[in-house]
Image (cartoon, grey):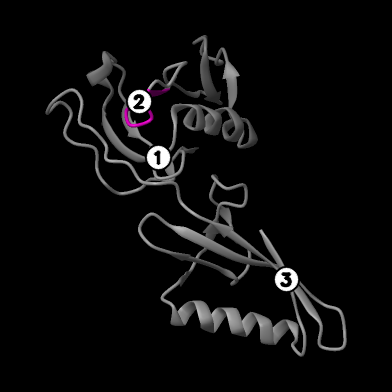
Amino acid sequence: MRKACVMGSSVGALQTFFTSGFAAMSWAHASVIPFDGVYLSDCGDPYCWTKDTAPRFVGLEAVQDHGGGIVTFTLRIVSAPPPVTCPQYPPSTPPAIPTEYTPFYHFYGLISIPLPPLTQALTVDGSYNGSTKLGDSYLQLCSAGSPTATKAFFTNELPAHGWTFGTSPCGTANVWYQGKIFFSFPGTIVDSKLYHMQIANC
């Protein structure tokens, strides 16, 4: 966060300055921004910008006119963690993890699961992990950051977005659940470059 003050300006002039300035530097408008540094939330106004494949974000906030041409404002600056090269394991089964970044996993249009920054995800049939139930999904995931940061993301963000850890209404213990949809992943993520998640709907 960067707080600043300018003189001889106005709210509108300041907003125009940043809008035109970021556009000139090839920053695009961002509809979402990680206000807490990790979870992508709605920006809520036209004054968020992003750039690069491993995205950086800037948000213009708290613009206030104090009279006499004095305007204060805050810039929220968020940099992406260093990207990782995802391994492929087991060899050739399933295929390689795609390189696109996936901030959410959408389970059959029913629900969205937030994922850590710069996550790459591969969805394969649930039977890969021994499931025979139609509709189950098995994800191989690869995230930037340390195993501790990846674990902390799920621990902090999932409850804030309606997920509960415990025994699901279907009777499955030690899972994250929301309604009848639940998923599990290793209790200890030993390598953020490769971990898995089993998702099911009972």
The quarter in which the C terminus is drawn is: top left
The quarter in which the N terminus is drawn is: bottom right
Q: Main secondary structure of the magenta part?
A: strand
Label 1 to label 2, Cα distance in Å?
12 Å
Q: Residue at x 86, y 79 (%)?
A: 66
The 10 Å Cα crowd at callout 2, few under 14, some 14 to 19, many 20 or more, is some
The x, y position of residue 90, in whole percent, is 18, 22
Residue highlighted by disc 2: 195
Q: Secondary structure at mark 3?
A: strand
Kind of residue at badge 2 = Tyr
Kind of residue at badge 1 = Ala
Residue highlighted by disc 1: 144
The 10 Å Cα crowd at callout 1, few under 14, some 14 to 19, many 20 or more, is many
Residue highlighted by disc 3: 4
Q: Look at the image and give the residue range highlighted in magenta.
A: 191-200
The reply to whether callout 1 and callout 2 are in contact (CB within 8 Å) is no
Residue 95: within the magenta?
Answer: no
Q: Upstream in the sequence, badge 1 or badge 2? A: 1
Residue 197: within the magenta?
Answer: yes
Query: Viewer-nearest of labels 1 and 2?
Result: 1
Q: Secondary structure at mark 1?
A: loop
The x, y position of residue 115, in whole percent, is 46, 38
Label 3 to label 1, Cα distance in Å?
31 Å
Q: Nearer the viewer, residue 120 or 81?
A: 81
- Against 113, residue 1 (above or below) is below
Q: Tag on residue 13?
A: none
Query: Viewer-nearest of labels 3 and 2?
Result: 3
Q: Residue at x 41, y 75 (%)?
A: 26
The x, y position of residue 16, in whole percent, is 61, 84
Q: Upstream in the sequence, badge 3 or badge 2? A: 3
Quarter residue 96 falls in = top left
